[in-house]
Image (cartoon, rainbow, N blue to C red):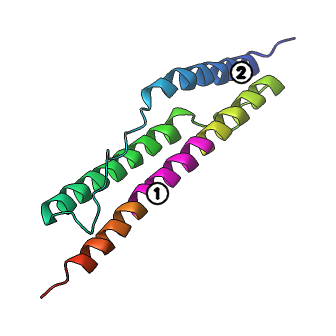
């Protein structure tokens, strides 16, 4: 005998997984700044523009991460899932973690490259 509450909960979980799959297309990974100037030869204006681009990239990645985190919400507490549904939820979570970790690594890489060039700029242009 099929119990309606269990069937309804399972149906809700399947619909949530389907909606999450469709939502994945909504999270667009932001492009990294096209270039970071060489701090030894860059002008002050070049460094200011690069700083703005890096800050915007970090804001965009943070928005992307929020989207990724929101695209696969956990099933409601007490929801009974089939083994197949559990596997789908686990796979979606693994994908979310991979996307999150890759985006954070990219964000750190861009920030670190800019900071290296900023240091080089400061060494090449000491304050008088």
Q: Which residue lies furthest to the top in this view?
A: 1
Q: How many marks?
A: 2
Q: Residue at x 57, y 34 (%)?
A: 72
Q: Nearer the viewer, residue 28 or 10?
A: 28
Q: Is mark 1 on a helix, strand or loop?
A: helix
* Label 1 packing within 10 angstroms: few (<14), some (14-19), many (20+): few
Q: Position of residue 97 (x, y in %)?
A: 61, 45
Q: Distance between the residues labelled 2 and 1?
A: 42 Å
Residue 60 lies left or right of residue 89; in this view the side is: left
Residue 102 magenta-highlighted: yes
Of labels 2 and 1, the one closer to you: 1
Q: Residue at x 59, y 40 (%)?
A: 96
Q: Is mark 2 on a helix, strand or loop?
A: helix
Q: Can residue 99 be seen in this view?
A: yes
Q: Where is residue 44 in the image (x, y as percent from the top left)?
A: 15, 66
Quadrant of the rendering where the C terminus is positioned: bottom left
Q: Position of residue 91 (x, y in %)?
A: 70, 33
Q: Give the range drawn in magenta.
A: 98-111
Q: Which residue is drawn at 87% across and 11% down?
A: 1
Q: Name the residue under label 1.
A: 109
Above or below residue 69? Residue 125 is below
- Residue 10, numbered label: 2
Q: Is the magenta stretch mostly helix, strand or loop?
A: helix
Residue 123 magenta-highlighted: no
Q: Residue furthest right?
A: 1
Q: Position of residue 125 (x, y in %)?
A: 19, 78
- Residue 54, numbered label: none
Q: Which residue lies furthest to the front in this view?
A: 41
């Amino acid at each position: 005998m099929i119990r309606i509450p269990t069937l309804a909960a399972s149906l809700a979980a399947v619909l949530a997984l389907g909606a999450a799959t469709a939502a994945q297309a909504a999270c667009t990974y932001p492009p990294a700044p096209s270039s970071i100037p060489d701090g030894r030869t860059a002008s002050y204006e070049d460094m200011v523009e690069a700083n703005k681009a890096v800050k915007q990239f970090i804001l965009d990645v943070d928005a992307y991460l929020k989207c990724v985190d929101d695209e696969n919400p956990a099933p409601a507490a007490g929801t009974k899932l089939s083994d197949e549904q559990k596997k789908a939820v686990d796979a979606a979570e693994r994908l979310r973690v991979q996307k999150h970790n890759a985006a954070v690594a990219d964000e750190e890489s861009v920030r670190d490259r800019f900071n290296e060039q900023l240091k080089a700029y400061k060494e090449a242009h000491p304050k008088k």
